[in-house]
Structure formats: C-alpha cells, structure tokens
Image (cartoon, helix red, strand yellow):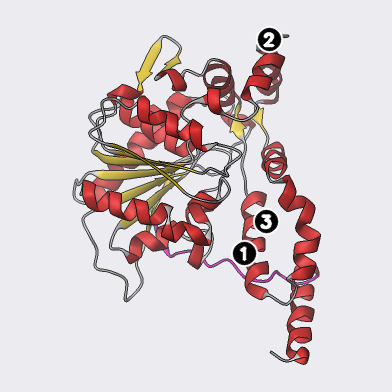
Amino acid sequence: MSLADTVTIAARNAWALTFGSGIEAPDPTPATILWDQPHRQLRRFERAEGDAAEADSAVLLVPPLAAPATCFDLRPDQSLARFLLEIGRSPYVVDYGEITFADRRMGFEDWIDDILPEAVLRTSADRDGRAVDLVGWSLGGTLALLTAAAHAELPIRSVTAVGSPLDYDRMTGVPQLRAVAKLTGGRGASTVIRAAGGVPATLTRIGYKVTAWDRELTRPWFVASNIARTEALAKMETIDRFMAEMPGYPGRFYGQLWGRFILNNDIGRGVVRLGERRIELANVTAPVLLVGGPSDVIAPAPAVEGGVHLLTGSAMVRYETAPGSHLGILAAPTARDTTWSYLEKFLAETS
C-alpha cells in the first residue's frame, strides 16, 4: 500500500471514530422472532444460501444476565450463531432485554423455572419436538445447568457451559470479598443493591471495564498505532458496542448471587439453595462440555473446571481450555479453532 493510500485510510478511520457513524456498521445474522414477551424473546437464526443443509439439532444459546445476547453474534467472523449455521445446526437465542427497577423482584427461579424452560420447549416445538442442545456463556452456562438439574422432564440433549463459574472458592477476589462481608455479616452490599432495585446497567459496564483495565488504559495507543488498519479498529469498535449494551441485574437475583454463590459457594458444593428448595448439579443427566480460559480473569479456568467433580450424574463430562479473555474464549478470532471446534465435535458425538 502506498503512503498516500495509508494516509487516506487513516484519515477516513479517524473521522469515522470521532465525527462519523463508526468504522463498521453492525451486521447481525438474520433471525426470525418466534416469541416476544418481556425478558424471553426467542429468535431463530436463519441460514444463508450456501450454508450447510439443515440438521435436526436445535441449539439454544443462553446468554448471562448483565450481558447482551449479541455475545453470540458480535460480527460475521466472531459469531457462534453463524458458525453453527455453517456446520448444519439450527441455532436459537433467548434474549432477556433490558432489566429495570420494575424487575427488581426477579430471581434465579424466574430463569430456572420459567424463562429457560419455556425457551427450551418452544425451541423443541419449532424442531418438531426434537431435543435441544443448550450452549451458555458465563452465568448463562450456570443457569443452563441449573435448569437441566431442576427439570429432568425437559427435552435437553446436552449442555455446554463456556466460561461458567462452578466453584466460587476459585474465583479471583472472592476470598477478599468474603473477608470484607464478615464485617457486616454479609448484609452491606445486598442491602444497597436491594434498595437500588438491582445493579444498574451503568455499574455493570464500569465493572466489566475494570476487569479489562489494561485494554482501557492502552486504548488511545491502540487506536493511534492501528489508525490505518480498518479491521483492527472494527473489532475494537465491536467490543465497545457490546459493553455499551450491557444491562443490569435485578435486585433479588443479585442478592441470591451474592449470598448463595459468592458468600456461601453453594454451586461449588453441588447444591444450590433457593429458600427451602435444593437444586443438585448431580441431577444433570445430559452430556456436558465445560470450556475454561486460563487467561480469563472474570471466571478463572479452575472455577470452571470445578464442575467436572460436581456433575456426577451426567452421561459424560468433558473439560477443555481456550485462550483469551472472558468474552474472548467465546467470540475471539481464535475461538473458531478452540471453543467452537470443541463444540462442533461435542455436538456430533452427542447427536
């Protein structure tokens, strides 16, 4: 590329980032809305001409709370949804939408007993009653496993959990949080969250940026050194857009997460207590694939791997590792050769 071309591209990119509409417009995978109610919109991704023939496998993508469902479809080359279409699967996604003060009474039970079971049943019905493969990222994987454990009657063929913490004793910073919580009996944070009706989206976005502080710190240098590399800037912009769309947590849900998971590590002991109810991970009978990231600071690999020893009732439990950040193990360019490849093999075996 000539110097003149480089300068022209750099100037165009600089304008797009500062005064323009951005480097690259969003290009989501085409999808059809099958069901649209608050916090449970179900969409079916549609295949393009030339993609592999449609298979009988329905794959329901389960996002976590406090992250948009676009995590599975960031951009064309960072889209698990498109990959599943390419290999002949039929992907669906359940989208929780915005979480507001009005949703403050929603808890784990709303997802485990209502939102996810309904999504599974509607997905299965759209595939003529066939069993559904669940694929969850982060806390979405935890919710998928708890749903499978609580509802053996659901047509769930397999569960894949990517970057899903299943042992909070191995989570970075949790011992320190527990030490601080002892000073107030664990009530300080939960009281504030309940009073606010949950964790607002703004706080969620700040928290995610804190975990990626090095990215935020070096962002100006990254932009300057890549100003003529449109593709690199487009990827950066995609992550910026993803973080800007992060919703919050309902107050009751976060209170349960704080008390039962972070402080007491119910999940790490294999039994989650919601009131007088007990949900045991050992009741998951479907095959399970766990993927952890050695470089993941949000859900460290050992916290994910802990699930191997808890899922004793599963027909098969496989644990794999993938490089990258918490989002990276799901959607980085390297995911195609790691996480997505593991998933393709796993789905083929469980089919």
Query: In terms of depth relative to the viewer, which is nearer, 195 or 310?
Result: 310
Q: Earlier in the sequence, mark 1 or mark 3?
A: 1
Amino acid found under the numbered disc labelled 1: Lys
Q: Amino acid at mark 2?
A: Lys
Of circles 2 and 3, which is in front?
A: 2
Q: Residue at x 32, y 55 (%)?
A: 344
Q: Amino acid at mark 3?
A: Asp
Q: Which mark is residue 235?
A: 1
Q: Nearer the viewer, residue 144 or 351?
A: 351
Q: From the top left corner, tell me how far across and down residue 52 is, in percent.
A: 28, 69
Q: Is residue 31 magenta?
A: yes
Kindly identify the residue that appears in the image at 39 percent across and 13 percent down.
277
- Which element type, helix, strand or loop, lies under badge 1? helix
Residue labelled with disc 3: 240
323 lies left or right of 231: left
Per the image, the residue denoted by label 2 is 182
Q: Is residue 286 magenta?
A: no
How far apart, in angstroms, are the residues tagged by discs 2 and 3? 36 Å
Q: Is residue 79 left or right of residue 216?
A: left
x, y percent for residue 19 = 80, 70
Front position in the image: 112 or 3: 3
